[in-house]
Image (spheres, rainbow, N blue to C red):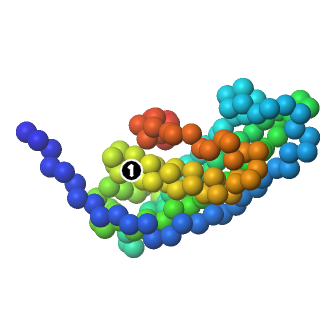
Amino acid sequence: MKKAAKEILIRIKEIKEHSFNLKSFSNLTEDLVFGKNIQMGIAFKFDANLEEDIFHFFTLIKYKTIIEEVEQILVELETEIIFEVKDLSKVVKKLEDEDQMNIDDDFIKTMAGVAIGTTRGMLASNTKGSVLSKFPLPILNPEEILKTVKQ
């Protein structure tokens, strides 16, 4: 028997940049190479207002390196994508501890794809003309993100 598809209508209500910090590169002595001397970190946070059908997806991106044996943050960007989701309670359930939610896998993968793509564009725009413009946010697999979020 085929599982009935859930029809959820979603729209982006607002895109916010909460913070952006770009380090000066005057003391950078070597070429940056992703995975070698530049590392990327990513974190997510969610919030839901079930009464108003609003879902908040927060993303924090950090690129860091070691300069003169000290870890340095090269760039940091925190974004929030606010989604309006018809019948949000069909895909998001608040648990007894109000800080925790049970979120449908397909829904969170879709939200992650949109949020990461939007954040990638914001990072590219903000780093335009800098050394870091050569390091756009990599393509990330929403399946892998889901595994990380569930841990």
Q: Give above or below for 89 relative to 25.
A: below
Q: Residue at x 73, y 34 (%)?
A: 38
- Crowdedness near tag 1: few (<14), some (14–19) or many (≥20) residues, C-alpha within 10 Å: few
Q: Residue at x 56, y 61 (%)?
A: 80
Q: Position of residue 34 (x, y in %)?
A: 68, 32
Q: Nearer the viewer, residue 100 or 106?
A: 106
Q: Residue at x 35, y 44 (%)?
A: 105
Q: Is residue 4 left or right of residue 30?
A: left
Q: Nearer the viewer, residue 125 or 65?
A: 125
The mark tally for this picture is 1
Residue that badge 1 annotates: 110
Residue at the far front: name it. 129
Q: Residue at x 39, y 73 (%)?
A: 52
Q: Position of residue 28 (x, y in %)?
A: 87, 38
Q: Give above or below for 85 relative to 72.
A: below
Q: Is residue 105 left or right of residue 121?
A: left
Give the structural element (helix, strand or loop) at label 1: helix
Q: Is residue 150 visible?
A: no
Q: Quadrant of residue 30?
A: top right
Q: Which amino acid type is marked by label 1?
A: Thr
Residue at the far bottom: name it. 52
Q: Position of residue 51 (x, y in %)?
A: 38, 72
Q: Position of residue 88 (x, y in %)?
A: 34, 63
